[in-house]
Image (cartoon, rainbow, N blue to C red):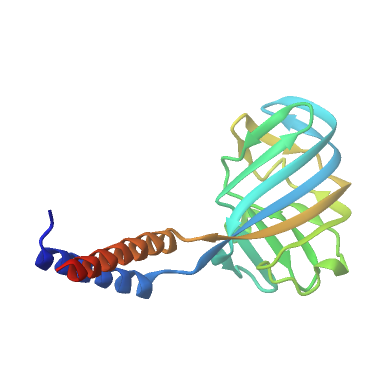
Amino acid sequence: MISRNKLQSLRWTMLCLVAIVCQSAIASADVVIFTHSGFNASGTLNGNPFSNTDFTITGIGNTDNLTSSVANQLDILHDSASIELVGIGTFDFTTPTRTIYIDNRDTVGINKPPTNGGDVYLSDSNPAFDGWDMLTSLGPVSGQHTLVGWDFIVVNTSEGRLIFNDATISGSFQALVVSVPEPASTGLLGLGALAGLLVGSSRRRRQLN
């Protein structure tokens, strides 16, 4: 059985830990899921041709990684990204990609970092994008999109190199921002609960004595 002195010492240790975590905890981190879709595209995957194929590119990033790499452009690097080619399969991108918003053109798209990586899928100008800060949910917004440069901008997937033929196609874009508690906050709840139990136990022991 824990002695009264040891219990009090443990209780104060836990309360100090709670205070430390309170000072360092971050309330939330916003995850953003970007969805870029296109219809009736053609190209090759690992050298195998496809045509009239619908696709959906899903990129997952974090709003903490919002940057402005060039003038009038905001971008968020994808922590992970994948593409579904309807009727073919779903594959992970192994080449880094990011979603971009070009403010003075009111367009969104995907390109390959660094700055000179080049745009590979870009929407036409659309007033629905006007003033977007990339930190809030948006869409879905449909319109014309352009596939360009995949033959010289290398984009690899888990199935091999992906090349879309240059084309203007119908497509859509959506951004979904989700707030996720940081691990520090979860730990804070656990420490707080444990400290509360210790305080209650100490009080009960004093009442019994």
Q: Quadrant of residue 98?
A: bottom right
Relative to the observer, which residue lies in front, 71 or 206? Answer: 206
Instruction: Identify the residue shown where x is 61% and y is 36%.
Output: 157
| Count of labels in the image | 0
In this view, which residue lies farthest toward the top?
Answer: 48
Residue 134 higher or lower than 44, as above or below: below
Q: Nearer the viewer, residue 51 or 91?
A: 91
Q: Is residue 88 above or below residue 126?
A: above
Residue at (58% x, 64% y) in the render? 63
Q: Residue at x 83, y 52 (%)?
A: 172
Task: Tell me the quadrant of the picture where the C terminus can be found.
Answer: bottom left
The percent coordinates of residue 8 (x first, y second) are 16, 69
In the rendered structure, the answer to whether residue 8 lies left or right of residue 46 reads left
Residue 148 % position (x, y)? 78, 48
Identified at 73% across, 50% down, the residue is 35
User: Is 158 or 43 nearer to us in this picture?
Assistant: 158
* Quarter of the image where one finds residue 71: bottom right
Q: Is residue 60 left or right of residue 38?
A: left
User: Measured from the top left, where is residue 118 in percent x and y?
Assistant: 68, 54
Please indicate whether residue 146 sits to the left or right of residue 207 in the image.
Answer: right
Placement of 14 over or under 163, stated as above or below: below
Task: Write down the quadrant of residue 70 in the picture.
Answer: bottom right
Report the side of 165 relative to 110 (left or right): right
Q: Position of residue 153 (x, y in %)?
A: 66, 45
